Image (cartoon, rainbow, N blue to C red):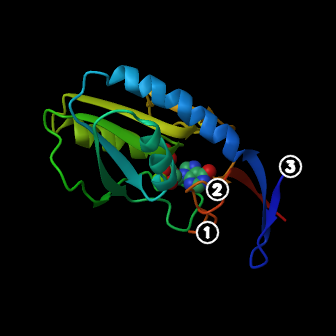
Amino acid sequence: MTTTTDKSTTYVIDQMISAKAIAARIEDLSSLIETEFADTNKLIVVGLLRGSFIFIADLVRELDLPIEVDFLEASSYGNEMQSSREVKILKDLRGAIEGRDVLVVEDIVDTGHTLHHVVNLLRSRQPARLKTIALLDKPSRREVDFRADWIGFEIPDEFVVGYGIDYAQRNRNLPYIGKVRFT
Ligand code: IMP
Ligand code: MG
């Protein structure tokens, strides 16, 4: 088990999902996405900032499809470990999605409020097809009925960091997914 100790903090990070396992899973997921969107003339891949930035970068490089990339930022936990439940759009898409095929890329589905809200918002813009993918899913934490179309890994109710995902803005640069353990 890989453990990272950050000297300025009171927690350690235990590896939960290795970089190799993530890469292998992304290869599998990209085949499923290619099949789903085989007939698209333009897929708009929408990353939810900031947690999905590494996932979307790795995912799009595995996609043999004509794509565009756009980003949307929804309000997040801030420096908290708790979901605020009220979701606000902090940065909207640059482009229109009406009549387009859209894939929303998220880091984690936790309570489900964020993706539920974002999907409802984007649906109201009448895309031709709207699908969702999340690297991680914590189904035991769900508060609204939401399921992403594709999930990388189902995980237990642990606070995780790395591979783009932060705790108080730290640890996004870890190449693997680790769980936070307070010491
Ligand atoms: P939801 O609205 O509760 O589903 O929360 C989704 C967002 O909460 C994710 O996009 C993450 O930014 C954040 N989040 C949920 N669980 C974790 C975690 O374990 N570590 C870091 N951020 C998390
Ligand atoms: Mg997020």
Residue contact between numbered discs 2 and 1, judged by CB atoms under 8 Å: yes
Which mark identifies residue 1? 3
Q: Which residue is mark 1?
A: 170
Quick check: 38 above or below 16?
Answer: above
Q: Disc 3 and disc 1: Cα gap in Å?
A: 20 Å
Q: Disc 3 and disc 2: Cα gap in Å?
A: 15 Å
Q: Nearer the viewer, mark 3 or mark 2?
A: 3
Q: Earlier in the sequence, mark 3 or mark 2?
A: 3
User: Disc 1 beta carbon < 8 A from ligand 1?
Assistant: no
Of residue 39 and residue 130, the one placed in the foreground of this image is 39
Q: Nearer the viewer, mark 3 or mark 1?
A: 3
Tag 3 secondary structure: loop
Q: Which residue is mark 2?
A: 161
Q: x and y percent of residue 92 in the render?
A: 25, 57
Q: Is 36 left, or right, of 141 in this rendering?
A: left
Q: Quadrant of residue 34?
A: top left
Residue in view at x 86 percent, y 49 percent: 1
User: Disc 2 beta carbon < 8 A from ligand 1?
Assistant: yes
Tag 1 secondary structure: loop
